[in-house]
Image (cartoon, helix red, strand yellow):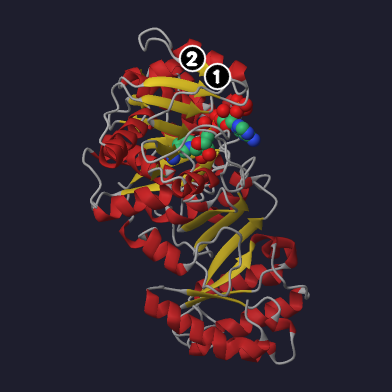
Amino acid sequence: MVRSDGISRALDLAREAKGHGADLVEWRLDSLVETEGGIRAAVRLIEESPLPCIVTVRDESEGGAFGGGHETRLAAWHAFASASPPPAYIDIELAAMHEGESSRAFVASLHRGSVAHEGRARAILSFHDFRGRPPGLSGKVSEIWADQSVAVAKVVWTARTARDNMEAFELLRLRAKPTIALCMGEHGLMSRVLAPKFGGFLTYARSDEHGTAPGQPTLHELLEDWDFRTITRSTKVYAVIGYPVAHSRSPAVHNTWFRKAKFDGRMFPVAVAPMWEAFKATLGELIACEGLDFSGAAVTAPHKVHALDYLAEVGGKVDDDAAALGAVNTIVRGTDGSLRGMNTDAGAIVEVIEGALASSTKKRLKGARVLVLGAGGAARAAVYGLAKAGAMVSILNRTPKHAKQLAKDLAGDLGEIAVVSPGHLPKEKFDVIANCTSVGMTAGPDPEGDPLPEGVALDASTLVFDAVYAPEETPLLARAKRCGAPTLGGAAMFLAQARAQFRAWTGSAPLP
Ligand code: NAP
C-alpha cells in the first residue's frame, strides 16, 4: 500500500524485488488516489516503476482502503492508462463494472488501446472475498471469462480449509483466458505456491515490509524456500496432515531434502480438523485432484488412526508395523495410484536409541531394561519397536489404565510388557528411560515439568531419551545431564522417521 510520503521508498523496494527476481510489481494505490495530488503521485510511481506494474485501487468492500466515490476511481484509472509508459495492467473489480456504464466503457477503451500513449494497459477483472468462498463463484468467473475486453480474470478468497485450493486449481485448469485463482489465509498457501503447476497467470509475494493479503509468502520465501521458479506441471506434491500443523518441521525438512536431491517435489502443511470425516474428505480430494500429482503424506496427531482406517476403506496396502501399531504416519501414493501406509516412528525410535546406547554405554538394545514414560501414540511406537528389538520394556503413565491397555494391545508376539504403577516405583535400574509423554514440550500441557518421578536412579549407565523435540533440552534432559546420564533429544527421532519417509517417497536417502 503506497502513501503520498512513501513514493521513493516504494520505488526502492521495487528495485530490490527486481534484483531478487520479481517479474512484476503491484502498486496498491487505494488511499493515495484520495489525497490531494495523489493521482499525480501515482502516475509518477507508474512512470518510474523499475518493473512492469499492475495498479490497483482496491475498494473497502473488497478488503482495500479506498473509500472514495466512483468518479474519483474512474479519474484515477484514466490517469493511470495515460501514463507514459502506462502500467501493464489495471486491476478493476467486477463489482465496479456492475456500477455503471463508465467502468465498462473504460475497460473497453483499454481493450481498444485508445487511451495509452505507448503500449497499452490491459484490464485485470477481479473479485475478492475475505470472509470465505464467495457465493456464485463459478458464475462470476464465467462472466469475466466471457468478457472479451478483459485480459486477465482474477479471483481471490479466504480458504476455509485446504480443500478450497483444489477448487482454485480446477478454475485454473478450466480457464478460458489467463486467470489468477488464489486462496488467502493459512489454508491457502498451496494455491499461491503451485499456481505455475496449473498454468496460473501469476502469484503474489510480499516484500518484507508490505503485504496486502493474509497468507502471502515473502518474495524470499517464495523464490528460495519454495524454489518457485522450478515448479512445473509434473512437480510432485506431498502434505503433512495434522491438527494443528503450522508448527510442524516436516515441510522445511523435506523441502530442503527434495531440493538437495534435485527431486521435483514440494511438501505443504495441511491442517485438517480432528474429525474422521474431515480427514477422509481432505485426503480424498488431494488424491482425486486432477493434475496435482499428490504423491504422499506425513500424517501426524490426531490423524494416524484415521490414516489406517482410510487405507482399509479404499483397499490400500498397510505395512506390518503400521498394522500392528494401529497407526499410519506415512502414506505413499504410487504413480499408478496405489496407496501404501507405513509407520516410520517405531523404526526411528529403535534406530536412534540403539545407536546412542551402543556409543554411550556400550550396551545392546536386545535384553536392555527400558522404562517408557507415557501411553499415547509415541509411547505405543516406542513400546512396540523396542520390545520387538528384544528390549525388556516397562510402561509408566499418569493414567495407569491407559498403560495397561497399551500393554494388553501389544502383548502376544512381543511377550510380556510390564506396567509400573506411579505409586510403586521399581528399585531396579534401567538401561534406557524414554519419555514419550508431552510433558516438557513448549506450549504443551506442562512445559516446565519433568515426567520422571524422583527416586528413579539416574547415572552414567542410563541413557535418557526424550521424544519431545521443542525445546531441544527439556527439564528431563537437563536433570539427566546433571546426574551424568547420557542423553538423546527428540530431534534425532524426528529426523530418523523423516529419513525413512523420504526413502519411501523418492527411493533414495536424503543427502547430508
Ligand atoms: P498423546 O498420544 O497425546 O499422548 C500423550 C501422553 O502424555 C499420554 O501418555 C498422557 O498421559 C501424557 N501426558 C500428557 N500430559 C501429561 C501431564 N501433564 N503429566 C503426565 N503425563 C501427561 O501424544 P503423543 O503423540 O504420544 O506425543 C507425545 C510427545 O511425543 C509429544 O511431545 C510429541 O511432540 C512427541 N513426539 C515426538 C516425535 C518425534 O519424532 N520426536 C514423534 C511423535 C511424538 P495420559 O494417558 O494420562 O493422558
x, y percentage for residue 3?
A: 66, 84
Alpha carbons under labels 1 and 2: distance apart: 6 Å
Q: Tell which quarter ligand 1 is in.
A: top right
Q: Determine which quarter of the picture holds residue 331.
A: top left
Helix, strand or loop at mark 1: helix
Q: Amino acid at mark 1?
A: Ala
For mark 1, what is the residue? Answer: 403
Q: Is residue 147 visible?
A: no
Q: Is mark 1 within 8 Å of ligand 1?
A: yes
- Which disc, if any, is residue 407? 2
x, y percentage for residue 235?
A: 32, 48
Whether label 1 touches label 2, CB < 8 Å: yes
Q: Amino acid at mark 2?
A: Ala
| Residue at position x 37%, y 73% in the image | 21
x, y percentage for residue 512?
A: 24, 53
Q: Is mark 2 within 8 Å of ligand 1?
A: no
